[in-house]
């Protein structure tokens, strides 16, 4: 079994934390993994992405081929569409529905949503509001991970929960609990 | 034990475990994390492994050569363009030879994710006539460091370790070992004085070692041949290219995996003979393709980047390698319609923003002005909303280009350079300008750190006024301001005064990078809580 995942968003939105948690869970489960990211100039408010490959077989390429990503997990709706050529025809987009507008030529929101909704498999949610309602305004990325959890398949929801506990352990029990709560909200939202 | 490591981290840990005594480096994407890993490593701290940042890649290379002279294992790390900065020391280190093992790590950036060109460091290895290692994955990156140190000490020559962005910044599980002993102090016995008479003899020795380098590559565990039934195409897969080839063809191809250079013409000719054509797959420039075309004869078909089978520019991907292998493309979604480019930008609240706002306001009164830029976060001042820069070429070029343009008659001629870039390569240019009394205005936008690469130490911290005055800039024309919106009247007044002054003036807008300021605030809070 293999799962190719593209994580994306805008620099500073916390996609690398998502990558770290999935990587931790995969390592713990003994699943092979490669995770490519770009540091440096691209982090300054520009688009950022990470290629995450999980497999029970040996993985060669650090990069995902076009037409083969099983899931695109995006912190921002326009960014989720940037990687369409990489998404498998049977793949799923899991994205925040709230635009992050820091450019003057951001597309018309209604047209953007129409194009997104026309995709065969999309799960979208205002993750910022959900995180806020859960009392963890900075946990939007964990809500998103929770939403994506059922589509990662190669890892169980429980394995991802455990990885959150491990990754945030050094920040204290309260931070772990807040992030688990945000994650659980995401999992619930995904079922609806 | 297995650890999840970035390619950069695998190299760092590989070096520590291979008995490293010092890493010398200037930050540069995608190489920065190597030195940062060593700085944060427990064993490195216990052993007192040198890991402080250097002023530039040349000082780094020379210090490493000194440590090697004293008999210890040392690593120099830089991004590809850093090789240009240290080239004098690098090329001549092959002539002196080394004593303790010396690895020069060059991190190339095909596709220019965070760079101004995509030069291929393997050319430097060939130019200096030394062995080059090029790992295909994170495990090889780890293992190769020890192999490269061993080879360096066996041949008494530096070894170049070349990686690319996609290896540097990609994580995978790596099997790691235990740290081995460091070398004892053991100063070189022979002369390293490259006077012509000695240099001629040493150059002859370097030439004599070429056969041993070829033979080391022949025996290398990192180079191997894979053969499949009924295949007529031979694929030469260099470094990380091996992964993209294997991703596409699995075990169903004839592959010559190349991860250690130089490669002998006999090896290539034998591989060519077993096949009807060769496809050379390499990330970066067509270094091997050119060499191989010269080895197999004009009639033998060699395909690669030069023939258009692979793109001439940009990094390799599983997709462009699939095309070169003639694999039919599967179904894909078209590009979305509602997607706009989202270029990087200066952080909200960054002091560089205030500097550009002030410069644009003051210079609007002068129709012919130009601002020459430099390398760092503040290069983003070239993009909207500021669009302030006329050029950005290499580390330090802002001051010297402003000087040359002023020499030609341009006025106002302004340079914008960061604090770390100024000490890296700006100081010598400023001395030229002082000696010529050039009519330039230099803005050293000082954020107390090397910001672009993530906030590393800045070599000249708290020394900028002293450096400028020491180089001979009139103290009355070394001005410091604090770049904040509320200070705009003062900043613009100072800028205007110094532009009106017809000589060398330096303005230092100084305010800490907001990213490092936030980090320092977090650390202070944590320390306060811990002390309770």
Image (cartoon, rainbow, N blue to C red):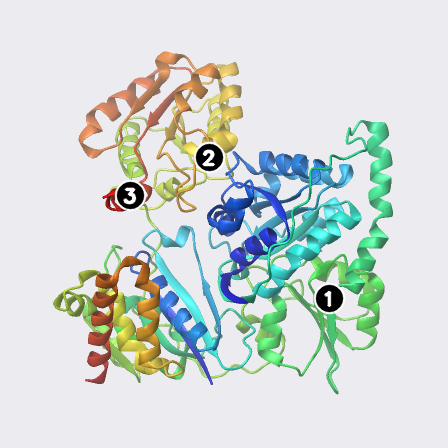
> Of the residues under marks 1 and 3, which one precedes in the sequence?
1
Image quadrant containing the N terminus of chain B:
bottom right
Image position, residue B109 (x, y; %):
54, 54
Image quadrant containing the C terminus of chain B:
top left
- Residue that protrudes farthest toward the left in the picture: A133
Quick one: label 3, few (<14), some, or many (20+) residues within 10 Å? few
Q: Which residue is mark 1?
A: B221
- CB within 8 Å, label 2 to label 3: no
Position of residue A170 in the picture relative to residue B52 (left or right): left
Q: Which residue is mark 3?
A: B527
Image position, residue B144 (x, y; %):
66, 59
Callout 1 secondary element: loop
Rounded to the nearest angstrom, the CA distance separating label 1 from label 3 is: 48 Å
Q: Residue at x 54, y 36 (%)?
A: B56
Callout 3 secondary element: helix
Q: Residue at x 20, y 25 (%)?
A: B489
> Of the residues under marks 1 and 2, which one precedes in the sequence?
1
Q: Is residue B63 above or below residue B17?
A: above
- CB within 8 Å, label 1 to label 3: no
- CB within 8 Å, label 1 to label 2: no
Mark 3 — on which chain does it sit?
A: B
User: Which quadrant of the figure has residue A162?
Assistant: bottom left
Image position, residue A130 (x, y; %):
16, 70
Q: Which residue is mark 2?
A: B421
Quick one: label 2, few (<14), some, or many (20+) residues within 10 Å? many
Rounded to the nearest angstrom, the CA distance separating label 2 from label 3 is: 31 Å
On the question of residue B174 being in view, the answer is yes
Q: Of residues A77 and B408, which is closer to you in this image? A: A77
Marks 1 & 3 on one chain: yes
């Amino acid at each position: 079994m293999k799962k190719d995942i593209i994580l994306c968003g805008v620099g500073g939105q916390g996609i690398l934390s998502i990558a770290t948690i999935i990587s931790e869970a995969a390592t713990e489960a003994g699943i092979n993994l490669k995770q490519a990211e770009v540091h440096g100039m691209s982090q300054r408010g520009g688009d950022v992405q990470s290629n995450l490959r999980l497999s029970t077989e040996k993985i060669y390429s650090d990069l995902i081929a076009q037409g083969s990503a099983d899931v695109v997990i995006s912190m921002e709706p326009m960014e989720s569409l940037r990687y369409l050529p990489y998404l498998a025809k049977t793949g799923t987009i899991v994205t925040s529905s709230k635009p992050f507008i820091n450019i003057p030529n951001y597309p018309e929101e209604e047209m953007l949503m129409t194009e997104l909704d026309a995709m065969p498999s999309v799960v979208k949610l205002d993750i910022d509001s959900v995180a806020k309602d859960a009392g963890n305004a900075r946990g939007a990325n964990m809500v998103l991970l929770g939403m994506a959890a059922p589509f990662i398949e190669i890892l169980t929801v429980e394995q991802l929960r455990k990885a959150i506990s491990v990754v945030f352990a050094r920040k204290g029990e309260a931070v772990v609990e807040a992030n688990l709560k945000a994650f659980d909200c995401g999992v619930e939202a995904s079922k609806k | 034990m297995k650890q999840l490591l970035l390619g950069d981290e695998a190299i760092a840990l590989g070096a520590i475990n291979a008995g490293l005594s010092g890493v010398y480096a200037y930050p540069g994407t995608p190489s920065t994390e190597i030195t940062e890993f060593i700085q944060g490593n427990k064993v490195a701290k216990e052993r007192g492994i040198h890991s402080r940042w250097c002023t530039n890649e040349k000082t780094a290379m020379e210090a490493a050569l000194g440590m090697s002279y004293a008999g210890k294992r040392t690593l120099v790390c830089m991004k590809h363009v850093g090789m240009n900065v240290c080239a004098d020391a690098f090329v001549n280190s092959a002539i002196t030879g080394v004593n303790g093992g010396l690895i020069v790590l060059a991190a190339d950036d095909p596709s220019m994710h965070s760079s101004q060109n995509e030069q291929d460091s393997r050319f430097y290895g060939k130019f200096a006539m030394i062995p080059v290692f090029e790992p295909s994955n994170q495990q090889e990156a780890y293992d190769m460091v020890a192999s490269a140190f061993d080879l360096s000490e066996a041949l008494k020559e530096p070894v170049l370790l070349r990686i690319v962005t996609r290896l540097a910044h990609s994580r995978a599980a790596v099997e790691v070992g235990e740290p081995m002993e460091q070398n004892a102090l053991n100063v070189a016995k022979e002369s390293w004085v490259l006077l012509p008479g000695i240099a001629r003899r040493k150059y002859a020795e370097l030439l004599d070692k070429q056969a041993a380098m070829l033979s080391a590559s022949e025996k290398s565990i990192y180079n191997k041949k894979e053969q499949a039934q009924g295949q007529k195409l031979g694929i030469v897969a260099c470094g990380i290219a091996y992964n993209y080839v294997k991703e596409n063809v699995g075990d169903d191809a004839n592959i010559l995996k190349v991860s250690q250079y130089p490669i002998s013409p006999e090896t290539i000719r034998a591989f060519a003979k077993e096949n009807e054509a060769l496809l050379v797959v390499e990330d970066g420039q067509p270094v091997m393709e050119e060499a191989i075309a010269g080895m197999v004869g004009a009639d033998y078909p060699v395909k690669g980047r030069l023939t258009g089978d692979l793109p001439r520019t940009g990094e390799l991907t599983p997709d462009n390698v699939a095309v070169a292998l003639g694999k039919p493309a599967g179904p894909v979604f078209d590009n979305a319609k509602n997607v706009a480019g989202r270029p990087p930008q200066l952080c909200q609240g960054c002091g560089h923003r205030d500097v550009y706002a002030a410069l644009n306001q003051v210079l609007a009164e002068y129709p012919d002005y130009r601002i020459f830029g430099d390398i760092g976060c503040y290069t983003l001042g070239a993009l909207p909303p500021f669009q302030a820069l006329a050029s950005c070429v290499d580390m330090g070029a802002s001051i010297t280009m402003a000087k040359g343009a002023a020499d030609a008659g341009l006025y106002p001629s302004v340079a914008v350079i960061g604090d770390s870039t100024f000490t890296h390569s700006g100081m010598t240019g400023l001395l030229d300008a002082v000696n010529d009394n050039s009519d330039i205005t230099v803005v050293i936008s000082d954020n107390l750190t090397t910001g672009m690469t993530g906030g590393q130490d800045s070599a000249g911290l708290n020394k900028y006024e002293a450096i400028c005055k020491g180089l001979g800039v009139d103290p009355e024309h070394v001005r410091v301001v604090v770049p904040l919106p509320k200070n705009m009247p003062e900043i613009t007044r100072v800028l205007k005064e110094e532009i009106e002054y017809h000589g060398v003036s330096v303005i230092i807008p100084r305010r800490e990078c907001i990213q490092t300021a936030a980090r320092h605030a977090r650390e202070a809070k944590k320390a306060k809580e811990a002390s309770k």
